[in-house]
Image (cartoon, grey):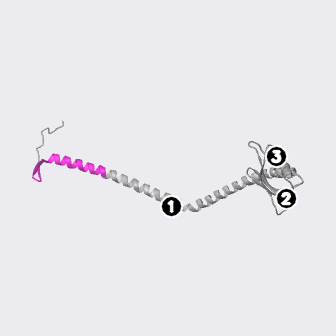
Amino acid sequence: MIRANLLPRPKDDVRFFGFVVDAEYVRATLAGAALVLLVAGVGFGIVRARIARLTALVADADAAIAERAPQRLEAKDLALDVARYQAFARETSAFRRSGTDAAVVVARIGNSVPRAVWLDELERGPDGYTIAGGAHSVDAVGETMLALASSLPAARAELVSLDARSGEAHAIHFSARVGATVGAEP
């Protein structure tokens, strides 16, 4: 048989700053506040432990990064060297391919110049060739322009300047540009 006391407990009153308060309510309130403080304390403890663990992980990662700084610098230098070597390889490949083409173009230009004309300068640019020279007559310069225009497939020759210098007897100096028209290769 189980015995139980079903009678209500007698109320214990407590005086608190001049107020009369039931002791059971005070006990329940204090127990609730203690429980809330305990849960909050455990929560703050867990958060502090997490923060401490993450701070230690960040410190370890920073130390590892600092430890590997020389390897990173070496890798960066190697990457820059590789980039320079690749650029050099591209340039040499372009020059290797363009050397034969340029020699053929220079030979064609040289072969198209009439005997009465001489060349002082032949310069290659990104969009064609600049030619400077002289002749004994304007007719020879005209023949040279026609010959230059027909020297290369789809080429265009332009007379840039014509100068009859008074200091030299019967000498006409000229400069011209020879370039491929749009969409054609020399």
Q: Position of residue 72 (x, y in %)?
A: 58, 59
Amino acid at dot 2: Ala
Give the CA separation, mark 1 to mark 2. 79 Å
Residue occupying the point 59% across, 61% down: 73
**Secondary structure found at label 3:** helix
Residue occupying the point 37% across, 52% down: 47
Q: Seen in the image, is 176 located left or right of residue 35?
A: right
Q: Seen in the image, is 171 located left or right of residue 72?
A: right
The answer to whether residue 62 is above or below residue 23 is below
Q: Where is residue 154 in the image (x, y as percent from the top left)?
A: 79, 43
Residue span colored magenta: 13-40
Q: Which residue lies furthest to the top in this view?
A: 1
Residue occupying the point 18% across, 48% down: 27
Looking at marks 1 and 3 on the same chain, the residue that comes earlier in the sequence is marked by 1
Residue linked to disc 2: 171
Q: Nearer the viewer, mark 1 or mark 3?
A: 3
Residue linked to disc 1: 63
Q: Which corner quadrant of the image does residue 81 belong to? A: bottom right
Whether residue 107 is visible to the viewer of this picture, yes or no, is: no
**Secondary structure found at label 2:** loop
Looking at marks 1 and 2 on the same chain, the residue that comes earlier in the sequence is marked by 1
Magenta stretch containing residue 7, yes or no? Answer: no
Amino acid at dot 1: Ala
> Marks 3 and 1: in contact by CB < 8 Å?
no
Q: Position of residue 112 (x, y in %)?
A: 86, 50
Q: Which of marks 2 and 3 is in front?
A: 2
Q: Position of residue 44 (x, y in %)?
A: 33, 53
Give the CA separation, mark 1 to mark 3. 70 Å
Amino acid at dot 3: Ala
